[in-house]
């Protein structure tokens, strides 16, 4: 079991985004991060994922009650966000090969579930924004990470795409600690707990 423990996190840009924030999320649990634009949702998610450092406080990962060395934290994390780039001159299959290392049966099945199978050998430069979002989600889920950090995962998805997203989330929830930065009501309702930034 993985537990993510945030202790007294604070972050400032031109103003204080959040101060002395603490929480703990373990395998099988989920936490939504809500708040208006510019409130620090994405910043907090990046800090949780270890790609940004807080001004004070820390985030620690524990695996079976033993601390994880910070050098290995990213091995535990799947991350998807609108601002993360994929390689538009590669196909979906090539993006998966580059990011994950191989295209196995799980990858083929996930592309089918996401409705991308007919386009798996098409360069992403010809994809719609919704299709590109599905590729980003595929890369996050295929990592089979213990911790899933999703920033506005439903952005650019149509209703069918959102249904698939929630189906995937429900499938991995028992074995994953999930963080979602969002203001979408359905995504907020999926998470059992929430933090609201202002």
Image: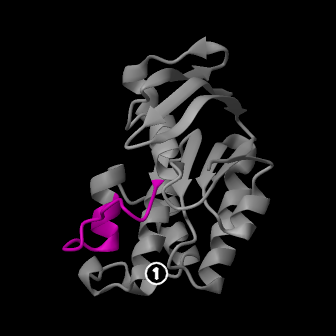
As for residue 101 lying within the magenta part, the answer is no
Q: Main secondary structure of the magenta part?
A: loop
In this view, the residue in front, 71 or 96, is 71
Res 77 visible: no
Res 134 visible: yes
Q: Which image quadrant for residue 66?
A: top right
User: Tag 1: Cα neighbours inside 10 Å, few (<14), some, or many (≥20)?
Assistant: some
Residue 177: give x, y in percent of width and height: 66, 40
Q: For the view shown, which residue lies furthest in the left direction? A: 89
Q: Which residue is mark 1?
A: 130
Where disc 1 sits, the SS reads: helix
Q: Residue at x 44, y 16 (%)?
A: 69
Q: Quadrant of the N terminus?
A: top right
**Boundaries of the magenta span:** 80-96
Left or right: 174 as drawn, with respect to 19: right
As for residue 92 lying within the magenta part, the answer is yes
Residue 110: give x, y in percent of width and height: 54, 68
């Amino acid at each position: 079991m993985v537990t993510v423990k945030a202790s007294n996190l604070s972050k400032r840009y031109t103003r204080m985004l959040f101060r002395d924030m603490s929480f703990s999320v373990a395998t099988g649990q989920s936490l939504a991060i809500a708040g208006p634009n510019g409130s620090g949702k994405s910043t907090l998610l990046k800090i949780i994922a270890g790609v940004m450092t807080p001004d004070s406080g820390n985030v620690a990962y524990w695996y079976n009650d033993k601390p994880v060395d910070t050098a290995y934290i990213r091995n535990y994390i799947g991350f998807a966000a609108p601002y993360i780039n994929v390689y538009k001159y590669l196909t979906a299959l090539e993006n998966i090969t580059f990011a994950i290392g191989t295209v196995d049966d799980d990858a083929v099945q996930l592309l089918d579930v996401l409705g991308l199978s007919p386009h798996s050998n098409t360069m992403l430069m010809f994809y719609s924004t919704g299709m590109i979002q599905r590729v980003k989600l595929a890369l996050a889920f295929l990592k089979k990470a213990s911790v899933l950090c999703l920033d506005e995962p439903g952005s650019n998805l149509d209703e069918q795409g959102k249904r698939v997203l929630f189906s995937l989330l429900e499938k991995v929830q028992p074995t994953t600690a999930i963080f979602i930065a969002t203001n979408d009501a359905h995504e907020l309702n999926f998470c059992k707990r929430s933090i609201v930034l202002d």
